[in-house]
């Protein structure tokens, strides 16, 4: 009986596990189809702040071959001179740490004729993902942060020393102390500059330095309800008359000292979209990403500007690695990427508890209760008689075995020693009942067993 219950429990456990897995995969598939697990401006998102509309629109045009990149940009090998790489919605805070290694396949493709387009997420909406960095790069960034904190603490200590000396010494001595504090500050800055040079040699220069541009925000501003009014600038890939300007919602502006940059779009006299030649190719930087979103294409689409942005290249590649979508080698990598550790561990704990509960009770065991033994007061140990009967029936005993089981429990409970004649007679009654339970029912067999046991 116990082996049968154990088999049923394991079968139910396996079935439950399969059902949970199917439901989990169904929910995840639905979320992936809807796109809400992806960050804003990802081409997989179909809600207002995704870019799936632009992806699908370009895919439907015969002059373009559109694809998504889910390979690390530093190992990308599919770009050629006839390609446009779109990095849409790059986080503003991480732009300063975006680097361009000397052997970058992206910049090499641009030199050969490709077009690189980078639009910035100005953080008007919350972000769900920050670009991943290697462990080695994270270590270097942490060391640089510590170096800056030490320098700031040194500068603060030097200023305090200067103030204390100013109260106790003459003006001349105060000047010497201040000069010493300045020397310490300069030495800290020199150390940080040397550290930055070492980082550049390891991971390449910052993209902002490599291409010679800066992104700065307005200190005080009031954003117009419909966005800032834009004006046409200059472009070497389109005529001024062909450009149609979108609305602009970002508070960031571009600055550069290089004459190689063309200010394509301006807001209040400052460029917000710039373009430059790089080798045989070109680079476009924009401080906003709203104009490529699904909402913008629905409410205030500017197809002429989008066509100019993509350029005359045949292959258009939407990069998804900046949104955290990379090729996964297995389920565990997918769980780590989308931070599903809690759900996964919860399922494991649930299945483990269910298996434990199926194998044994969570409360301490009691053999008297398990076997239905009764005490000297003729009641089931730890339970009332009615509950004891229910407990007995819950054991799923076959009907033709019920009387046999009750008789064995009665014998073990009262520890009765039957005469050989009584035992043989009861055995015959039980065999007769088990062989033909329809014609010789349990009630009739029970009465005959009772009469047989009453005989002395």
Image (tube, grey):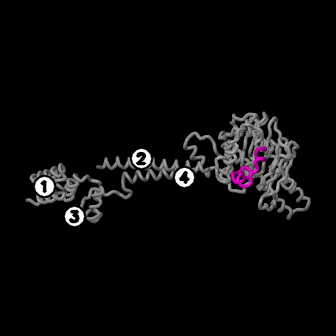
User: Is residue 296 a member of the stretch shown in magenta?
Assistant: yes
* Image-quadrant location for residue 140: top right
- Whichever of labels 3 and 2 marks the residue nearer the N terminus, that label is 2
**Residue 364 placed where, x, y %?**
36, 58
- Whichever of labels 1 and 3 marks the residue nearer the N terminus, that label is 3
Provide the residue span drawn in magenta: 290-308
- Whichever of labels 1 and 2 marks the residue nearer the N terminus, that label is 2
- Rendered view: 447 above or below 82: below
Mark 3, other Cα within 10 Å: few <14 / some 14–19 / many ≥20: few
Question: How far apart are the alpha carbons under marks 3 and 2?
Answer: 43 Å
Secondary element type, mark 3: loop
Residue at 39 percent of width and 57 percent of height: 362
- Nearer the viewer's eye, disc 1 or disc 2? 2
- Whichever of labels 3 and 4 marks the residue nearer the N terminus, that label is 4
Mark 1, other Cα within 10 Å: few <14 / some 14–19 / many ≥20: few
Secondary element type, mark 1: loop
- Nearer the viewer's eye, disc 1 or disc 3? 1
- Nearer the viewer's eye, disc 4 or disc 2? 2
In the displayed structure, does residue 10 sit left or right of residue 367? Answer: right
Mark 1 and mark 3 residues within 8 Å of each other at the beta carbon: no
Farthest residue in the right direction?
172
- Rendered view: 258 above or below 362: above
- Whichever of labels 1 and 4 marks the residue nearer the N terminus, that label is 4
Residue at 48 percent of width and 48 percent of height: 22
Residue at 81 percent of width and 42 percent of height: 211
Secondary element type, mark 4: helix
- Report the number of discs: 4
Mark 3 and mark 2 residues within 8 Å of each other at the beta carbon: no
Reading the image, the residue beneath label 3 is 376
Reading the image, the residue beneath label 2 is 14
| Dominant secondary-structure state across the stretch colored magenta | helix
């Amino acid at each position: 009986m116990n082996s049968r219950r154990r088999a049923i429990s394991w079968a139910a456990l396996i079935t439950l596990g399969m059902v949970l897995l199917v439901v989990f995969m169904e929910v995840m598939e639905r979320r992936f189809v809807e796109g809400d697990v992806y960050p804003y401006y990802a081409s997989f998102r179909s809600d207002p702040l995704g870019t799936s509309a632009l992806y699908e629109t370009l895919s439907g045009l015969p002059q373009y071959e559109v694809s998504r990149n889910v390979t690390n940009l530093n190992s990308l090998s599919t770009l050629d001179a006839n390609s446009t790489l779109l990095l849409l919605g790059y986080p503003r805070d991480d732009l300063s740490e975006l680097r361009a290694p000397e052997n970058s396949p992206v910049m090499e493709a641009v030199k050969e004729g490709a077009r690189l387009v980078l639009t910035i997420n100005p953080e008007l909406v919350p972000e769900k993902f920050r670009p991943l960095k290697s462990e080695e790069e994270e270590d270097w960034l942490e060391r640089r942060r510590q170096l800056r904190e030490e320098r700031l603490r040194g500068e603060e200590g030097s200023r305090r020393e200067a103030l204390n000396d100013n109260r106790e010494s003459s003006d001349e001595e105060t000047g010497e102390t201040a000069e010493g504090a300045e020397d310490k500050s300069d030495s800290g800055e020199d150390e940080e500059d040397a550290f930055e040079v070492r980082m550049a040699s390891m991971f390449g220069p910052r993209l902002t330095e490599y291409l010679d541009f800066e992104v700065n925000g307005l200190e005080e501003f009031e954003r117009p309800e419909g966005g800032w009014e834009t004006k046409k600038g200059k472009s070497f890939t389109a005529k001024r008359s062909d450009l149609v300007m979108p609305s602009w919602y970002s508070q960031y502006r571009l600055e550069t000292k290089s004459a190689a940059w063309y200010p394509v779009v301006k807001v209040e006299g400052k460029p917000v979209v710039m373009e430059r030649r790089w080798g045989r190719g070109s680079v476009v930087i924009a401080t906003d990403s709203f104009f490529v979103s699904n909402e913008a294409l629905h409410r205030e689409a500017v197809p002429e500007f989008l066509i100019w942005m993509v350029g005359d290249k045949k292959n258009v590649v939407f990069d998804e690695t900046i949104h955290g979508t990379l090729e996964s080698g297995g389920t565990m990598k997918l769980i780590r990427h989308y931070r599903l550790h809690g759900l996964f561990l919860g399922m494991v704990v649930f299945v483990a508890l269910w298996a434990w509960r199926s194998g044994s009770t969570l409360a301490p065991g009691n053999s008297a209760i398990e076997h239905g033994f009764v005490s000297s007061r003729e009641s089931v140990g730890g339970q009332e008689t009615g509950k004891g009967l229910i407990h007995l029936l819950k054991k799923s005993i076959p009907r033709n075995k019920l009387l046999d089981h009750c008789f064995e429990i009665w014998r073990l409970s009262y520890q009765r020693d039957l005469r050989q004649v009584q035992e043989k007679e009861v055995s015959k009654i039980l065999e007769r009942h088990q062989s033909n339970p329809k014609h010789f029912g349990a009630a009739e067999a029970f009465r005959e067993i009772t009469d047989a046991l009453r005989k002395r």
